[in-house]
Image (cartoon, rainbow, N blue to C red):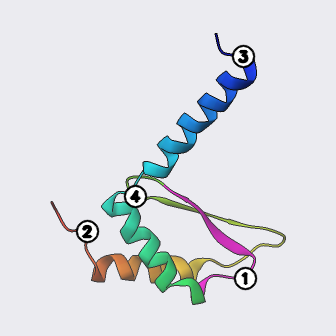
Amino acid sequence: MLTRGQRAAALALLLFTGCVTMQNTPAQERTWAACEFCKAEMPPQCQVERVESSGRYWTGCSGTFANMGNFHRCVNEYFRSNPLKKS
């Protein structure tokens, strides 16, 4: 019989292994590429917080209000220039 600590360690290992093997979807890869391409347009106090499997992304800013318009325009232009390839 496993002790509580051994069960916790086994569960942590399974969760870690599951997370390591996850891969991004093509839509996520395209979004991350667009964000990297457009990072010069992002205010310094802001960052991309997450990207869903559909490619939808969330940004967040700390401190003061930031104008994200140039960044969003750049990402949208990247998407128009680099359409998602159908598989």
Label 1, secondary structure: give it: loop
Position of residue 44 measured from the top left corner of the image (x, y, whole percent): 72, 82
Disc on res. 44: 1
Q: Circles 1 and 3: CB distance less than 8 Å? A: no
Task: Kindly identify which residue carries mark 4.
Answer: 24
Determine crowd level at label 3: few under 14, some 14-19, many 20+ residues with C-alpha closer than 10 A.
Answer: few
Residue beneath the point at 30% across and 78% down: 80
Q: Which numbered disc flags the more N-terminal residue, 1 or 3?
A: 3
Determine crowd level at label 4: few under 14, some 14-19, many 20+ residues with C-alpha closer than 10 A.
Answer: few
Comparing marks 3 and 2, which lies closer to the viewer? Answer: 3
Label 3, secondary structure: give it: loop
Query: Mark 2 is on which residue type?
Result: Leu
Instruction: Give how far apart the Cα atoms at labels 1 and 2 are.
Output: 28 Å
Task: Kindly identify which residue carries mark 3.
Answer: 3
Q: Which numbered disc flags the more N-terminal residue, 4 or 2?
A: 4
Q: Which numbered disc flags the more N-terminal residue, 4 or 3?
A: 3
Query: Mark 1 is on which residue type?
Result: Pro
Determine crowd level at label 2: few under 14, some 14-19, many 20+ residues with C-alpha closer than 10 A.
Answer: some
Position of residue 79 measured from the top left corner of the image (x, y, whole percent): 34, 75
Disc on res. 84: 2
Position of residue 13 measured from the top left corner of the image (x, y, whole percent): 58, 37
Viewer-proximal residue, 28 or 83?
Answer: 28
Instruction: Give how far apart the Cα atoms at labels 4 and 1 are.
Output: 26 Å
Determine crowd level at label 1: few under 14, some 14-19, many 20+ residues with C-alpha closer than 10 A.
Answer: few
Query: Mark 3 is on which residue type?
Result: Thr
Viewer-proximal residue, 43 or 20?
Answer: 20
Please determine whether, in this image, residue 37 is positioned above or below residue 56.
Answer: below
Position of the C terminus by quadrant: bottom left
Q: Which numbered disc flags the more N-terminal residue, 3 or 2?
A: 3
Q: Which numbered disc flags the more N-terminal residue, 4 or 1?
A: 4
Q: Circles 3 and 2: CB distance less than 8 Å? A: no
Residue beneath the point at 51% across and 46% down: 19
